[in-house]
Amino acid sequence: MVVSIDANVQYKRALKVNLALAVLVWVCWYGFGGAHAVQSVIDNWQITVTMIFGSLVAGATSEGGGAVAFPVFTKVLGIPPHEARVFALAIQSIGMTAASIGIIFLRVRVEWRAVLWPGLGGIFGLLCSTFYVLPLVSPPLVKIAFTIMVSSLAIALIFMNRSEKIQRHSALPFVGRKEICILMFTGFIGGIMSGLVGSGIDIITFMTMVLLFRLDEKVATPTTVLLMTSNTLVGFALHGMVLDTFTPTVQGYWLAAVPVVVVGAPVGAYLCSVLSRRTIANVLIGLIAIEFVSTLAVIPMSPRVAATAALTLGICGLINWAMCRSAAYAPAAHPA
């Protein structure tokens, strides 16, 4: 790949900004936690290692770091789901913010209208989820529903990307009242999922932008990073200042991950900026496949869980099929 002089200048500027941000965060991290912060890394090294990978995924794809943290924490490390959920929101508020700053300074193309309108809907969805939905559902049902939902996206991406002649928009083709309602509703549903597992508004909005609006994955991915940043900042503030669920235990997990996510997420954002659209889609499909297999391996398949999986697959499959088949926002086909 040939990189222009302007691109080199942007990369160097973004590198300097992210390095300065990382140093600032490290200084604040030690100033806030002191010896306890260092000890947290030693005591919770598994979390530190997990979030090296999680932060790269958060910056480079629309899956979000919470999609890595939540299943590993709850099923591998034995951390209670409510602590894993609060941690996911808290740590992404650091990593996603760092990745967003990198995206802005790299001047990566972003669809800002898909940040604004789903972001507003996501705030209401997050509040609704935290106060009304969360007490009614069990973690296994939530996790299997989330996994099946994103798995249906992988199937749809495979279906849509079969043709080498597929065209994508570099921006939303047009945004009127109907499109604003679609984007806000998408953000609302994504906010509900973020409130349940600590991640979700990014991948759900990605589904709508790519499958319905035919937005290029190279634009949709950084857009969802900025969107997830706004959602996690609200979620972290909600749990830290209102619900008081940012407990000393969760703080210890958070301190163990902060030093790596502030570097890993911007690196992931950089990788996304240099990869092709098809590569980004293939990486996302691969990550979803790993999540699907690992979820089936660790969640007991009771009749209730199986029924939830089947219902989610049916609903999401039908919605994704309808979005893929819709020609309302499809660009003109390539000439033969």
Image (cartoon, helix red, strand yellow):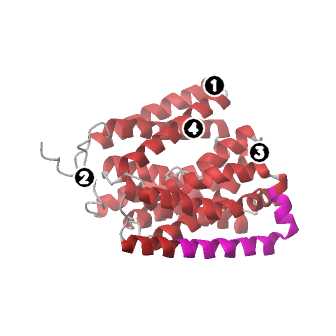
Q: In the image, residue 128 lies at what x, y percent?
A: 57, 56
Q: Decide: marks 1, 3 in contact (CB < 8 A)?
A: no
**Residue at mark 2 to residue at mark 4: CA–CA distance:** 30 Å
Which circle, 2 or 4, is nearer the viewer? 4
Sort mark 4 into few (<14), some (14-19) or many (20+) by Cα contacts within 10 Å.
Answer: some
Instruction: Give 175 or 151, whichever is nearer the viewer.
Output: 151
**Residue at mark 3 to residue at mark 2: CA–CA distance:** 43 Å
Query: Height in image: 163 above or below 303?
Result: below
Which circle, 3 or 4, is nearer the viewer? 4
Whichever of callouts 3 and 2 sits on the residue coming sooner in the sequence is: 3
Write down the residue under mark 3.
79
Instruction: Give 75 or 129, whichever is nearer the viewer.
Output: 75
Write down the residue under mark 1.
301
Identify the residue at image location x=67%, y=27%: 300
- As drawn, the label of residue 329 is 2
Kind of residue sitting beneath label 1: Met
Q: Residue furthest left?
A: 336
**Residue at mark 1 to residue at mark 2: CA–CA distance:** 39 Å
